[in-house]
Amino acid sequence: MSRSLNKVILIGNLGADPEVRSTNSGSRVATLSVATSRQWTGTGGEKQEKTDWHRVICWNNKTGSGLADVCEKYLKKGDKVYVEGRIEYRTWEDREKQTRYVTEIIARELIMLGSRGGAAPVGAGAGAGKGAAEVGGKAPESLDAFPEALDEEDDDLPF
């Protein structure tokens, strides 16, 4: 039996306030626009940067994870977030009979990395809407305090 994995992890900033709507069946969904950037030095020694934009979909689900509600209540443009989920590709035909394509990240977990009250996990592993102090007893340290953790390669790995 072959196994597979579809897992995406993003750390980035919101490019706009969350767009929250309700479906015909009453479910709530939030759409986030998350920017991630990478930097490198070009062949001429000049610094270069590229920003990628990711469409992240956050649903309220039956297990009590109210990701859409949390996004609506606590997130705003510019906030730094950690998103974990899966990637999906969809196609559809618009009114002009043109085939449209979209790539989306379906969020399973969201952690607010902003400085307002520390990071707060929300999703499959945490109660919706609980702050960091309620979840773990004390606020976890933000990745902002350790920027080298995101940029540095670890050559001391034993494998």
Image (cartoon, rainbow, N blue to C red):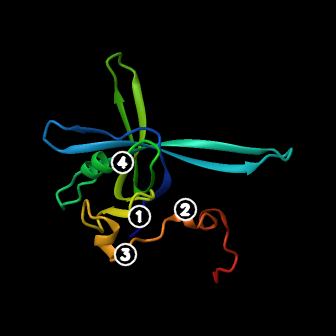
Residue named by callout 1: 118
Disc 4 on helix, strand or loop? loop
Residue at 59%, 42% in the rendered image: 51
Work out whether mark 2 precedes mark 3 in sequence or the reverse, and give the earlier one: 3
Relative placement, left or right, of 72 versus 36 is: left
Kindly indicate whether the residue at mark 2 contacts the one at mark 4 (C-beta within 8 angstroms): no
For label 4, count other residues whose C-alpha is less than 10 Å away and answer few (under 14), some (14-19) or many (20+): some
Kindly indicate whether the residue at mark 4 contacts the one at mark 3 (C-beta within 8 angstroms): no
Q: State the mark number for residue 144.
A: 2
Q: Amino acid at mark 4?
A: Leu
Q: Amino acid at mark 3?
A: Lys
Label 2 and label 3: CA atoms lie apart by 17 Å
Residue named by callout 4: 75
Q: Position of residue 31 (x, y in %)?
A: 34, 41
For label 3, count other residues whose C-alpha is less than 10 Å away and answer few (under 14), some (14-19) or many (20+): few
Relative placement, left or right, of 93 versus 62 is: right
Q: Position of residue 21 (x, y in %)?
A: 24, 37
Work out whether mark 1 precedes mark 2 in sequence or the reverse, and give the earlier one: 1
Q: Amino acid at mark 2?
A: Asp
Q: Quadrant of residue 115?
A: bottom left
Q: Which mark's residue is nearer the viewer, 1 or 4?
A: 1
Disc 3 on helix, strand or loop? loop
Work out whether mark 1 precedes mark 4 in sequence or the reverse, and give the earlier one: 4
Q: Position of residue 11 (x, y in %)?
A: 50, 55
For label 2, count other residues whose C-alpha is less than 10 Å away and answer few (under 14), some (14-19) or many (20+): few
Q: Position of residue 3 (x, y in %)?
A: 41, 67
Q: Is residue 135 above or below residue 93?
A: below
Q: State the mark number for residue 138.
A: 3
